[in-house]
Amino acid sequence: MLDVEVPAGVNPASGRVAGTGAATWAEQKRPLLVAGSFVVAIVLGVVIGLVWASDDQPAAERTATEQPDAPELRPVLPAVDWETSREPGRPVKVSLTPAQRAAIRVPLQWLAAWQVRTETGAATPVASDVNVPDGLYYGAIQGASREQDVFWAVGRAEISGVPDSDARNPYVWMRDGSAPWALVAHGPGACARIPQPLMDVWGSPGVCAG
């Protein structure tokens, strides 16, 4: 058998070159490192999946009690100045005659009374117990047709037998085309539901302050 000189660093039995301490440690820990990488990949995948799932969830929306459809809430649509010169999306401050101001208050008073009854479960108040005083703001966002005009109103409600603290002013009402008037919101922050362009046309209603 020939004597062969084995170079330094070579293992005579295996023929492998002896590595550094770090390389030897990596070799020994390879199964653990592979397993650890696999676990990290799974965790990362789960986290990314959760993030995407949360992004796909619809934004939370404030829901309201289903509102009634009474004849008082469907008055005849008013004649509008922009009928022959429509600009869909344009906000308009609507001026009312004394008769129109009285007529528009009927559905607003009806809804304010209904809201109190809904919250308390009582049989009162009724529409005649509600007064919408001067200071009511009325306007619209023009649509492509009469059926697409959206009317808005904001004001205070004075309700017989209900203290102001429970009335939670101001009240914001809205009517979409010939649909019935609806009570959109009332109380602090209610005016945030009104389209900002219409608020700008109104000049920041005092009833919305505070």
Image (cartoon, grey):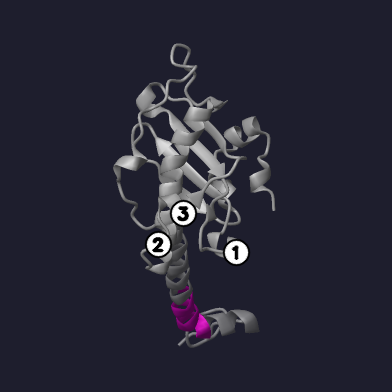
Q: Magenta region: which residues?
A: 28-37
Which of pointers 1 and 2 lies earlier in the amino acid sequence? 2
Between 37 and 210, the residue placed more toward the observer is 210
C-alpha gap between disc 1 and disc 3: 16 Å
On the rendered structure, is 132 left or right of 67? right
Q: Is residue 136 above or below residue 192?
A: above
On-image quarter of the N terminus: bottom left
Q: Is residue 97 above or below residue 156?
A: above
Q: What secondary structure is found at the residue carrying circle 2?
A: loop
- Mark 2 residue crowding within 10 angstroms, few (<14) / some (14–19) / many (20+): some
Q: Which mark is residue 124?
A: 2
- Let me know if residue 32 is in the magenta part: yes
C-alpha gap between disc 1 and disc 2: 17 Å
Percent position of residue 70, x then y: 30, 45
Percent position of residue 38, x then y: 43, 74
Instruction: Identify residue type, mark 1.
Output: Ser
- Let me know if residue 124 is in the magenta part: no
In front: mark 1 or mark 3? 3
Whether the residues at callouts 2 and 3 have beta carbons within 8 Å, the answer is yes
Residue 14 showing in the rendered view: yes
Which residue is rendered at x = 36% and y = 41% of the image? Answer: 73
Which residue is rendered at x = 37% and y = 58% of the image? Answer: 65
| Disc 1 target residue | 165
Which of pointers 2 and 3 lies earlier in the amino acid sequence? 2
